[in-house]
Image (tube, rainbow, N blue to C red):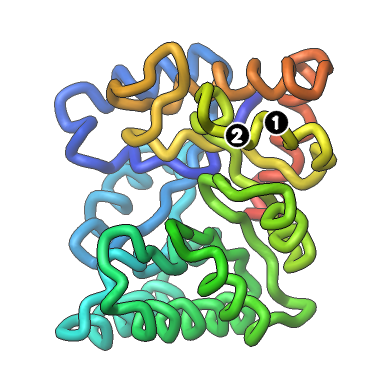
Amino acid sequence: MFIDTHTHLYSESFKEDRDEVIKRALDQSINQFVLPAIDSTYTKAMWDLKEQHPNLMHIMAGLHPTHVDPLSVSEELDHVKQQLEQENVCAIGEIGVDLYWDSSTKDLQQKAFAQQIRWAKEYDLPIAIHCRDAFDEVFEVLEQENNDKLRGVFHCFTGNLDHAKQAIAFNLKLGIGGVATFKNGKIDQFLKEIDLEHIVLETDAPYLAPKPFRGKRNESSYLIHIAEKLADIYQVPLSKIEEITTENAKKLFKLD
């Protein structure tokens, strides 16, 4: 069994063929899916999908950094808190800092990130971190909020070896996805230096499809190509990647 620890299966991108997408994943022995939040406008779609597949889907609550808006951030954070109080969520995410699209909200993104980390520790939940062009800013917040309750996953990890070691020092797993299969992805050059106990698998579907589907819509069934790439990098059988990364994900998100 494989677990896709980060997939937006509730996305409009799957509106026409969501059932077929899920079936293709199940046919590849990918039968647990962790759904990261974006903002309140996606909440109903996430929980509708959970209701349809209660044993397959696991829900996060959180405010994505690119959706941190000065006009709505307070209301959105209230919505996250309400989810934490009323629903059975498995993590807070995806949260973090993204300076690729808009650096003008950096301070506000960091504040929202810090607040959601504090809630994660309060509710004993892992976090799923989104980081784009913002490693220094993310690590700055993690340093401020660090304690023995902090744990989670560095989603879509694209950093260097030093970044990886920093993330692991904060009790974070590395979420490895399609970038590991890219010729210019670079993480494949040092990943073997990171013990598999620190790795979980993800697709970030519908984004960042691995080779040989790069540039097309990503889906959870493609997780097998990421797992095969890791088996090649680590020079171990695919079954070893399956066993270790699945156990890592189960422990992190407290999945049955």
**Image position of 99 (left or right of 199):** left
Q: Which of these two is toward me, 246 or 189?
A: 189
Kind of residue at disc 2: Lys
Q: Nearer the viewer, residue 56 or 212?
A: 212
Among the 4 quarters of the image, the one containing residue 152: bottom right
| Left or right, residue 171 beside residue 203 | right
**Left or right relative to 236: residue 37:** left
User: Whole-percent x and y of residue 2?
Assistant: 62, 27
Give residue 228's quadrant in the image. top right
- Residues at badges 2 and 1 in contact (C-beta under 8 Å)? yes
Q: Is residue 191 above or below residue 25?
A: below
At a point 48% along the width and 44% down the height, the residue shown is: 6
In this view, 11 is above or below 224? below
Q: Residue 185: give x, y in percent of width and height.
A: 54, 32
Name the residue type under label 1: Gln
Residue in the image at 73% along x and 62% along y? 166
- Residue at x 26%, y 82% (from the top left corner): 73
**Place of residue 176 in the rendered image (x, y in percent of width and height, measured from the top left):** 60, 38
For residue 103, above or below residue 1: below
Report the number of discs: 2
Q: Nearer the viewer, residue 41 or 147?
A: 147
255 or 118, nearer to the observer:
118
Which residue appears at 31% of the width and 51% of the height? 46
Give the quarter of the figure containing the C terminus. top right
Up-down relation of residue 142 to residue 24 (above or below): below
Q: Which residue is mark 2?
A: 186
- Crowding at dot 1, Cα within 10 Å, few <14 / some 14-19 / many 20+, comes out as few
Asked if residue 119 shows in the view, the reply is: yes
Is residue 203 rendered to the left or right of residue 191? left
Q: Which mark is residue 189?
A: 1
Q: Secondary structure at mark 2?
A: loop
Q: Position of residue 186 (x, y in %)?
A: 60, 34
